[in-house]
Image (tube, grey):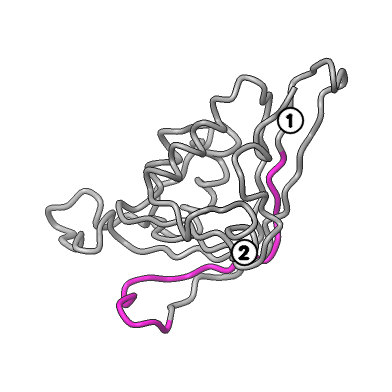
Amino acid sequence: TAPLYLEPTSPENVLLNFQTAYRQRDCTRYSGLLADDYQFYFDEDTRVKHGLPVFWTRLDDSLEVCGLFHDPDITAIRMELQHGPPRPPLQMGRDNWVYVDVTGGFVEIDCATSVAHPQGQTRRFELGGSRFYLRLGRTAADTDTVHSETAHRWYIVEWDVLSGVWPGDRDSLHCTP
């Protein structure tokens, strides 16, 4: 049988592993896909509406996503991303990076049955209009491919939500009774 996770030897493999980590609710694998200096940027409308910071750090993001994965009221999570090919960014300081535009996709969260929802419920969030930045190496200085175990692996450095249908607050992602 094929392995559940692919070696992170390409941006495409990392994005496939990202989706698998969501589907499997695998906090360890999810966090392992993120560079040490990872940042998640909310779209401005969501950030302002919910009083969120400009970005979450790797720790902030991992804590939120892992909380979602371990929510006992969630019975399943599905994620699908449609995206374009990796491209080199034109910004200074991102010489060894690529970006991937997400052109469509979704996250679906199945909630357990409750008094308010005896059949359960599914929440769906559209994911078009975001951009992932990836680079080789867990840190920006991780370039020694001879001695470093992570210099030859791709990591997500940044996820920018460019236009918002992302719910933007923790409560809207979690199931409520």
Horizontal side of 1 relative to 155 (left or right) equals right
Classify mark 1: helix, strand or loop: strand
Where residue 82 appears, as percent x and y from the top left, is 66, 60
| 130 or 13, nearer to the observer | 130
Residue 148, x across and y down, in percent: 17, 52
How many numbered marks, from 0 up? 2
Give left or right: position of 165 versus 83.
right
Which image quarter holds the N terminus? top right
Write down the residue under mark 1: 110
Identify which residue, 44 or 158, lies in the foreground. 44
Closer mark to the observer between disc 2 and disc 1:
1
Q: Position of residue 79 (x, y in %)?
A: 65, 44
Q: Is residue 21 left or right of residue 143?
A: right
The part of the image, by quadrant, that contains residue 89 is: bottom left
Spot occupied by residue 67 in the image (x, y as percentages of width and height): 51, 31
- Residue at 43% x, 71% y is 98
Q: Furthest-top residue in view?
A: 115
Q: Which residues are magenta?
A: 90-108
Q: Is residue 101 magenta?
A: yes
Q: Is residue 63 left or right of residue 73?
A: left
User: Which labelled disc corresponds to residue 102?
Assistant: 2
How would you classify the magenta stretch by its main secondary structure? strand
> Which amino acid type is shown beneath numbered disc 2?
Val
Looking at the image, residue 5 lies above or below residue 46: above
Kind of residue sitting beneath label 1: Asp
Q: CA distance from mark 2 to mark 1?
A: 23 Å
Image quarter of residue 120 = top right
Instruction: Compare residues 173 and 45 and report the one nearer the observer.
Output: 45
| Magenta-span inclusion, residue 57 | no
Q: Earlier in the sequence, mark 2 or mark 1?
A: 2
* Mark 1 crowd level (few <14, some 14–19, many ≥20, 10 Å Cα): some
